[in-house]
Amino acid sequence: MGHANRSYDAIVVGARCAGSPAAMLLARKGYRVLLVDRATFPSDTISTHIVHPMAIAALSRWGLLERLVATRCPPVDTYAFDFGPFTIEGAPGTMDFPVGYCPRRMVLDKLLLDAAAEAGVDVREGFRVDEVLIEDGRVIGIRGSDKSGQSIKEHARIVIGADGRNSIVAETVRTERYNERPPLLAIYYAYWSGLPMQGRFETYIRPNRGFAGAETHGGLTMIVGGFPVAEFTASIKRDIEGNFQKAIDLVPAFAERVRSAKRETRLFGAVTPNFFCKPFGPGWALVGDAGYLKDPVTAQGILDAFRDAERCALAVDEALSGRRPFDAAMSDYQRDRDAAALPMYDFTYMLAALEPPPPDLQRLLGAMQGNQKAMDAFAGVNAGTMSPAAFFAPEHVESILKAAVA
């Protein structure tokens, strides 16, 4: 893959939850890495915020967990799911990593960016990528402009797109999408003060409505609500504020808590598509939302980004070092990503429909009442600690139903 006059081994476009870790991990292996982002940090971005326990495990592997803890973000040790007739609440993590967090992105992303810079990454904030450079069918670098507006070209052996759902890298190489599904939910969130959650991430599911809350930085609690896209387009978007409040009012006890709190920000929102992309080709790769995106109802984006960053950095290292051919290493990256992601993709899409659970699932959910091990497992599925495939395996379902009868 070498080219004598290329100044970088890798250029990473996008410096948030997928890009900064990918750049950092490659730099720690001794590669020359350029990381660019049009934003300057600290800055915010649309996000579900939740860093599930397995993403916390990644921060620990990278030596960054203590830094997050030091930001005084409240830990989340209980995930609670209120379906109306009953509530399932359990521990989302493992013995080693029992808690999640719900950090503001202006804090988390800056922490990750700083770690990349410390690893030796050449970081350029306020840098807009105008063009992904291609020569003889291969990506060879980028052309962009810095804060002064000066046009700059940079070359690399590989360009990694970590630039989100509207990735210029993905668009330029015209990567193929697969497993595409139409968007189901419009998601909106805001921040409240005076709404303590006591370490709980609370989710409320009602017919055609869903919302959740968790504490974040600065004594604030983030509440996020979802509406079916068809209904949103037809009527809800005319009065998002009013409809958001009406959704919360479906749970009177929670609505009472919200009324005694104070909303500190406007509502932020988005409609998210569902797709996988082929995440590599000659001279390029994709990580995070640029390569795979799903409805945010299970808040898996940050966990997915961290996993992708590790898998991609490993594969790129194998290819750049010459230990394995590029296509072989990157094909494994795609296969591993898809195998890990697909069960959660299907589970998320089922939840995003905001429809009453089918009879079999209702029976299973009802059988979990008072069975802490089963409730912990359900919390673990939603956290990405346990695969939905393992949870819904016939023998596991049978054990929960038998325990309920006993």
Image: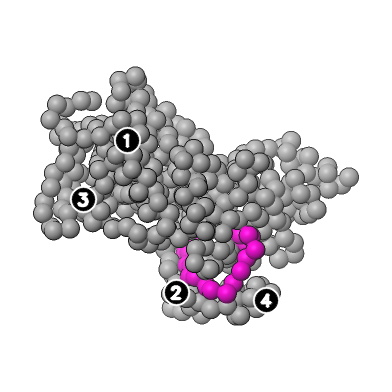
* Residue shown at the point (25%, 43%) measured from the top left: 122
**Helix, strand or loop at mark 2:** loop
**Helix, strand or loop at mark 1:** helix
* Residue 187, x across and y down, in percent: 48, 64
Q: Earlier in the sequence, mark 4 or mark 2?
A: 4
Judge whether residue 344 can be spotted in this image.
Answer: no
Relative depth, front residue between 29 and 233: 29
* Residue shown at the point (56%, 63%) measured from the top left: 215
Q: CA distance from mark 1 to mark 2?
A: 38 Å
Tell me which amino acid carries mark 4. Answer: Pro
Q: CA distance from mark 1 to mark 3?
A: 21 Å
* Residue shown at the point (43%, 66%) measured from the top left: 269
Q: CA distance from mark 2 to mark 3?
A: 31 Å
Q: Main secondary structure of the magenta part?
A: strand
For the magenta stretch, what is the residue range? Answer: 185-203
Q: Earlier in the sequence, mark 4 or mark 3?
A: 3
The residue that mark 2 highlights is: 265
Label annotation for residue 27: 1
